[in-house]
Amino acid sequence: MPKEKEELFKKIGVDVSEDNINIDIGKTKDFFITLQDKLQQKAEKMEKDISEGKIDLGDEVGIKVDDEHIDIDLKKTKSFIEELGEKIEHFLGEIDHVAKKLEKKPEEK
């Protein structure tokens, strides 16, 4: 496993070796609580902005909405969608890889 993935897994409390997957429940729980808090804050801000009639995703997504205008930067939007697609593909590939490893383990015993 590449070093950066190994470090990421350690941060969230998951240790993957050839024969075992160890999960540190405390670290994993802390990670998900932190993630939940960040997502909750973002959701609350977006809800507030939407209720006020404004959305600003300009820097990342290329979309800005206010009371009078909707501005869409097609280059930024396309780039965002492509990056998101790549990340999703990578994530699904990792899940598939781990699933295949787990499928092989019972056969080897």
Image (tube, rainbow, N blue to C red):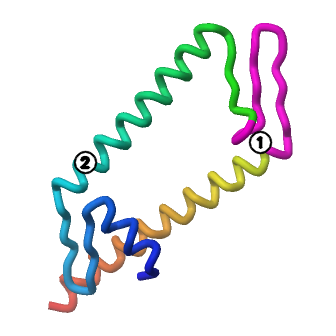
- The residue drawn where x is 63% and y is 52% is 84
Q: Is residue 9 shown left or right of residue 60? A: left
- The residue drawn where x is 50% and y is 30% is 42
Residue 32, percent from left and from top:
30, 46
Residue 91, percent from left and from top:
49, 62
Q: Is residue 36 shown left or right of residue 106? A: right
Magenta extent? 59-76
Q: Is residue 17 shown left or right of residue 92? A: left
- The residue drawn where x is 44% and y is 69% is 94
Mark 2 secondary-structure assignment: helix
Mark 1 secondary-structure assignment: helix
Q: Is residue 29 shown left or right of residue 109? A: right
Residue 69, percent from left and from top:
84, 15
Quadrant for residue 101, please give it.
bottom left
Residue 51, percent from left and from top:
58, 9
Residue at label 2?
30
In the picture, the disc for residue 99 is: none
Residue at mark 2 to residue at mark 1: CA–CA distance: 33 Å
Name which of mark 2 and mark 1 comes first in the sequence: 2
- The residue drawn where x is 76% and y is 25% is 64
Amino acid type of the residue tagged 1 in the rendering: Thr
Q: Residues within 10 Å of mark 1 (few under 14, many from 20)?
A: some
Picture mark count? 2
Residue at label 1?
77
